[in-house]
Image (cartoon, helix red, strand yellow):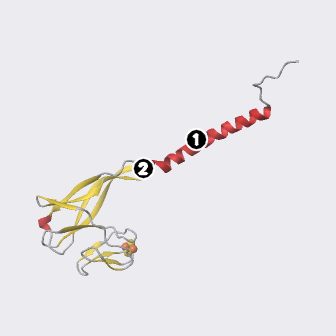
Amino acid sequence: MPKKSDYMISRRGFVGGVVGLVGTVISAVVGLPVIGYVVSPALKKGAEEEWITLGPVSALEPGIPAPFTFSQMKEVGWRRARISQTVYAVTDGSGNVTVFSDACTHLSCKVHWEEGRGAFICPCHDGLFDTEGKVVSGPPPKPLYSFQTQIENDQLMILVEG
Ligand code: FES
C-alpha cells in the first residue's frame, strides 16, 4: 500500500487555500486604490507660497477699499486650472496697507465694497464687515482674511498659496 506523502493536502484544504488567495487578490485590487486615495493628500508636498503683485499703492485712497483681481494656477480637484481672485486693498494714509480676501467667513460667498454703506457686504446672508475687515453684523463668525503684504517700488504685493 502506497504511503501517504507528507505534502499531500485534502481537497477541502486546497479549496480553502484557493478561496483565501482569490479573496486576498480581490481585497488588494479594491482596497489599494481606496487606501491610496485616503493617504495621498498627506503625502503631497505642501502648497508653495508666492508673491503676487497687485498694483501701485499710490493709487489707493485712504479709507476706501479698492478691488484688485489676479489669477493663478491652482489644483482644483484632480486638475490644475487658472483661477481668478479678487481682493480688496485699503490704506490708512500713513503707509499701512491691508489686503482682504473677498471670501465671506460664513459660507465663503463673495463680499463686495459698498461705498454708500461704508462696509463690505455679503449678499448671501447680509453679513457686514467694516474697513478693517471686522464683523459689524450678520452671521460671519470672524473677520475677513487679510493677506501678508509687502511694498516694493510703490507696488503692492500679497503672499498667496500657489
Ligand atoms: S456667506 Fe456671507 S453671510 Fe453667509
Q: Quadrant of the N terminus?
A: top right
Q: Looking at the picture, how far across and down is residue 37, in whole percent?
A: 49, 48
Mark seen at residue 51: none
Residue 2 sits in quarter: top right
Q: Looking at the picture, how far across and down is residue 32, in whole percent?
A: 54, 43
Mark 1 is surrounded, within 10 Å at the Cα level, by few (under 14), some (14 to 19) or many (20 or more) other residues, namely: few
Residue at image location 28% in from the left, 73% down from the top: 133
Judged left or right of residue 51, residue 17 is: right
* Residue picked out by circle 1: 29
Ligand 1 sits in quadrant: bottom left
Residue at image location 40% in from the left, 69% down from the top: 107
Q: Looking at the picture, how far across and down is residue 4, in whole percent?
A: 82, 23
Judged left or right of residue 20, residue 109 is: left
Where disc 2 sits, the SS reads loop
Q: Mark 1 is on which residue type?
A: Val
Judged left or right of residue 119, residue 138 is: right
Where disc 1 sits, the SS reads helix
Q: Is mark 1 within 8 Å of ligand 1?
A: no
Camera-nearest label, 2 or 1? 1
Q: Looking at the picture, how far across and down is residue 123, in whole percent?
A: 35, 75
Residue farthest top in this picture:
1
Residue at image location 24% in from the left, 79% down from the top: 118
Mark seen at residue 78: 2
Mark 2 is surrounded, within 10 Å at the Cα level, by few (under 14), some (14 to 19) or many (20 or more) other residues, namely: few
